[in-house]
Image (cartoon, coloured by chain):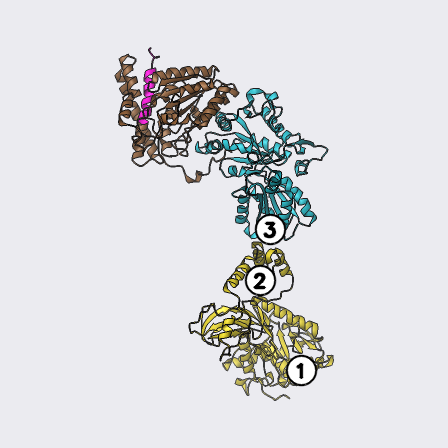
Chain colours: A yellow, B cyan, C brown
Amino acid sequence: MSFAIVMPQLGLTMEEGTVSGWLKKPGDVVKKNEPLFSVSTDKVEMDVESAVDGTLGKIIVPVGETVKVGTVLAYVNGGDGEDITAIGSEQPSSEDLEESSAPQEGSIQPTSAPARSVVEQTSDRARSRQSVSPRARRLAKELGVDLAAVRGNGLDGQVTEKDIRGASAGPRDRVASSDGARRQLIAERLTQSVQTIPTFSVAAEVNAENFVALHESLKQSMAQAGGAKLTITDLLLTVFAQTLKGNSELNATWEGNAVSRRTSVDLGLAVATPKGVVAPVIRNLGSTNLQALVARRIELVEKARAGRLSLADLEGGVGTLSNLGMYRVDHFQAIITPGQSSILAVGQIRKRPWVSETLSVKPTVMLNLTVDHRVADGAIGAAFLSKMVELIENPQNFSWQSTASSGDGAGRRSNA
Amino acid sequence: MGGVKTASQAEAGQTADQQRLITYAEAGVEAVREEMRRDPSIFYMGQGIGPRGGNFQQSRGLWAEFGGERVRDTPIAERGQTGLGIGAALAGSHPIVDIVFLDFVLEAICEIIQQASTIHYISDGKFKVPVVVRAAGGGIRSTGPHHSHTFYSFFMHIPGLKVALPSTPYDVKGLMKTTLRDDNPVIFIEHKALYNIKGHVPEEEYLIPFGQAAVRKPGDQITLVAMGQMVHRAMQAAVRLEQEGISVEIIDPRTLAPFDKDTILTSVAKTGRLVIVDEAYAACGVSAEIAATVASEALYELDAPILRICTLPAPHAFSPSLDNYLVPSVDRIVSEVAALVGKKL
Amino acid sequence: MKPPNGLATSLYRGMVEIREFELKAKEIFRSGKMPGFIHVYVGEEAIAVGVCANLRTDDYVASTHRGHGHALAKGISARSAMAELMGAVDGCSGGRGGTMHLYEPSVGFLGSNGVVPPGILIGAGAALSAKVRGSDQVAVAFFGDGAVNNGAFHEGLNLAATWNLPVLFVCENNLYATEMPFEQATKNTSVASRAAAYKIPGVAVDGNDVLEVYAKAGEAVERARRGEGPTLLECLTYRWFGHHEGDPGTSYRTKEEVAAWKKKDPIQRLREKAVAESWATAGEFNDIDNEVSRVIQDAATFAVGNPQPAVNTALDHVFSN
C-alpha cells in the first residue's frame, strides 16, 4: 500500500508551494513525524514531516518546482514489500487503476492518466542531462542560474549560452534555492507594498534621557530577578503597543475596501537573518508583561535566525517595529509590511544638541512612523506619534510591568 | 580558383599598389631560388623538376640558374630519392626531395618515418637531418584515386617531423624560406589546385614561423578551421553564411607540426562552436586531432557538438559528379555550418 | 705479395678487436644484463676491417643491423660502442639507439640500421652530398644478401650509377638472410653479377681473406675518389652464430657447414699467413691479443657500470633547435 505525499496547505491563503529540499532519497526508510521535505511559500519556509512509516518511492516533484497545494510530490511505500520502482510514476498505470478501483483508506486517489514507461523516463532524464551544453553549464554556475528553471532553445531543445544569459537577465518563473526564494519573497512583498499602499510619514526627534535611565534601572532589576536581558527594543515595542492600545484608529488594517479594526495588539519586530529580513509577530502586546515580552522576543528572534518560523509566526501583525539603532543611522524610513498599516523606524540613540530653553546635550533618538493613508490621515498619524514621543520622554507616567519589581523600581500606576 | 582575397595583404601590412600579385607556384620558386642563392648546401631533386621546371612549374627556372649538379631530375624512384636525400642531409647538405604528387610519398614513407624522423633523436642530437620532402596534395579536376590524396595526418602523427601546409602564395614563400633554414626534416605539402591562384607577395624578404596560425576572416559565432584548398572554399561559404546572419571565424593553421592550438582555443572561447573542414578523410585525421584537443582543453567553452566536414570515406572517384560529392564543396560547407546553428540553407 | 709494413698487424688488430668485442657482448647479453637483442659479426671481421682500412676519417660508412664490426672498424671506441649496447648514457648515441642505431659523425659513421636496405640509400646519399659539394669524400654502404632483392637496392644502385656517385656498395653475403638461404631467395645467386645491370664494376671476393678484401676495396675506393663512380663488391663470408643472440643458427644450417666455415676463420688465416711469410711474429700477435683483451675488458666494465640516461631528457632532441 502506498501513501501519497502531497503539497501541504501551510497557511490559510496558501495556494501553491515550492519544494525547496528533499531530506530523503528514494529507497530511504522514512519514519512517521520525521522531517521528509521542505517547502517554501511567499510567507514561510519550513520542513514537513512524514505522516507515515515506510520507504520513500520515486520523487515526482523535484527541488525547485512550484506546484499547487494538494499535488502529489512522492509516494511512501507502505513497507509491505512492494516494488518501489513501480510506484512513483507521475501518474499510475492503468493496471494500478484497475487493481485499486476503490479508494483505499489512508491513500489519496491519484488522478487517472497513462503512465510513462521507465525507459521513457530514463531517457527523459538522460536527455535532460545531456541537453545542456558544457558552455551553458559552466555559465549557469558562474551566474548562479538554476538550470532546472531554464528552457532550452538550441538544437533538439538543448540549453545553450543564449538561454542562460537570457535567464540570468530576465524574470524567473520558478524559485529553486532557498536563498533565492527568500529574496524573491522579499522582493515581491515589498514591491507589492510600495505599489499598493499609499503612505505618509511623520517624524520626530525625541529626548531619550529619561528613557535610557528607565532602561538601565529596569534592566538591572530584571536581571537581579533572574530574568532575561531587557533591551531598548523591548521597551520601544511596549511604547508602540501601548499607544496602539489607546488608539483604535491605527490598530486597524485596510482589508478589501474598508478599514478593519482589531481588538488585540499584535506587532511585528523586524529581525535581520542571513537569509533576509523577517518580522515575526508578538501577539497580545496590550496584555503582556515585560518579562513575558522579553521571553517571547528572544524566542522569536532565535527562531527567525534559525529559519524555523511558522506561518502563524508571521501573520496577523497590525504594525512593525524596525530598530536600526545598533548602526550609525540617525533616521530612516521603512516600508509597510503588506497586510499591516504602519511601521515605526527607529534610529540610533546618540548625544545631540537639544534646545529647550537653553542649548544642552542630550541623548536623543529619531522616530519615523510610516502610515497607510487608507487607514488613517495625517492628523491621526501625527497625534499617534506625539503620544509615543510623550511616553518616551516622560516614562514615569506609565507603569512598566516587571514581575520582579512589583512595588520597587519604576513604580506602578495603571494607565488608561 | 583565382584571386581569393585572403589575409595576405593585411599580413604584409602594405597597400595593394605596393605589392605584387604572383601565383602560388611562382611564390614557391622565388623562395627556393632565394634560399639556394643564400645557402650552397641546398640542392633540389625530383622527377621532372630540372629543365622542365616541374609538373606544376614549381621549380621553374632553377635548373637554368643553378645547373644540373644542384637541380637534378630523378628517375621514378621515390624511395631512392628520399633515402638519398636523407643520406645527403646527414653528410651536410640541405636537399629538397620533390615527390611531385603527394600520393607517391607512400613509396618513400619508410625512409621518412623510420630514418628522417628518428635520426636526430636516436643519435642523441649528433646528426641533424635537414631534408625537405615537397609534394602537391589534393584533387583538381578529377585527378582520380591515385593523384588526389591529402596525407598530412600521417606526418603530423610522427614526432620529429615538421609539416607545412600553405594555402596562399604569401604563405608558400614565407613558409618555404623558413623550411629551408630549419635543420629538421620538413614535409612541405602544397595543393595542386592552388598553384595558379594569385596573391599579394612582398618582394622583400620575410619568413613565416612554424606554429603560427592565420585568422583568415574574423567572426564571432562559429570557429571554422580549414586547411589547403578548403580555406578558399570556407571563405566562399562564409560569404554566403554572413548574408544569412551567421558569423564565421576562419582559422588556417598553416603548419600542422608544430601546431598552433592557442589561436583555435582562443577563438572557441569566443564563439563556443567549432567546425573543421578538411579535404582528408575524417577517421584519425587532422580534424580528429583538433576536435580532441578542443574537447579536452576547452570543453566548457563548447555550446554545440564539434562538427567535422571531410571527404567522405571512399577512394577519390574519377567521375566529376562523384568527386564533387565526396570532397567538401562550398554548398556542403554552407549547409552543414548553418545546421549547426539551427538554420536550413 | 708482401703488404706494406704494419698492415698485417693493423688488420689483425682490427679483426681481433671486433672478435673480442662481439664475444664479450654475447657474454654480457647471456648474463641478462643487456637490453634488446644483438646480431653479432663473428666470422665476418675481415670485411669491415678490410674495407674500412682504406677509408679516411672523413669518409662515410652506412651500416646494417649487424653493425658493431663496421662501427669499431670505422673508429668508434669499444667503450663508446659497448655502452651504447647497454643503452647507457655514455654510449655513442647517448643510449637512445642501442645496437642497431650506433651513430658517430666525428668518424663519418652514418648509423647502423634497424631496417634492412636503407643503409644503401643513406650511403649513396652521403656520396651525393660529397659530389654536389665538390668534395673528394667517399661513402661505403654495407648490406647483406638479404638486401639485394629489395627495391631499395635497385633504386640506390641505379641512382648511384646514373649520377656517378663516389660510393662503394659492399654486400656481405653470408648465405642466409635470417633463416632464408640465399639460393631460395633469388634465382641469381651471384650478387656481383647484378652490377652489370647498372653498368658499374661488380667484384666478388673471398670475404674471409682480409688482404683480398683490403685490396679490392682499395681499388674501388680509389675509383670513387677519382670520380669514376660506384662499385659493387660482393664478399662471400659466413656468420658463426645465429642471426641474432637467441637464434642458434642450426635449424636452417648444418653443423658440418658451420664447422667447415669456422675452419676458414679470417683471423687465424691472416695470422698463419703472416707468421709463415714473416710479415710479423707470433709474439707480436700475442701482444695484440693481450692488449685487445684488456681494452675489451675495460670497455665491458665501463659499459656495465655506466648509468642510463635521465628520464628528464626523454623529450630532448626530438627536433634540432
Q: Is the magenta stretch mostly helix, strand or loop?
A: helix
Q: Quadrant of residue A264?
A: bottom right
Q: Left or right: C160 with respect to A281? A: left
Q: Tell which of B35 and A345 is nearer to you.
A: B35
Task: Quote the CA–CA distance across marks 2 and 1.
Answer: 41 Å
* Amino acid type for the residue under numbered disc 3: Gly
The chain holding disc 2 is A
For disc 1, the neighbor class at 10 Å (few under 14, some 14 to 19, many from 20) is many
* Rendered position, A169 above or below C26: below
Q: Tell which of B197 and C301 is nearer to you.
A: B197
For label 2, the SS is loop
Q: Is residue A305 visible?
A: no
Q: Left or right: A251 with respect to C105? A: right
Q: Name the residue under label 1.
A: A252
Q: Where is residue A392 in the image (x, y as percent from the top left)?
A: 64, 80
The chain holding disc 1 is A
Q: Give the range drawn in magenta.
A: C1-21
Q: Residue furthest top?
A: C1
Q: Can residue C293 be seen in this view?
A: yes
* Amino acid type for the residue under numbered disc 1: Ala
For disc 2, the neighbor class at 10 Å (few under 14, some 14 to 19, many from 20) is many
- Kindly check if marks 2 and 3 are in contact, taking CB atoms under 8 A apart as contact: no
Residue C320: which numbered mark, if any?
Answer: none
Q: Where is residue B237 in the image (x, y as percent from the top left)?
A: 66, 44
Q: Nearer the viewer, mark 3 or mark 1?
A: 3
Residue B272: which numbered mark, if any?
Answer: 3
Q: Mark 2 points at which residue?
A: A146
Q: Where is residue C159 in the image (x, y as percent from the top left)?
A: 49, 22
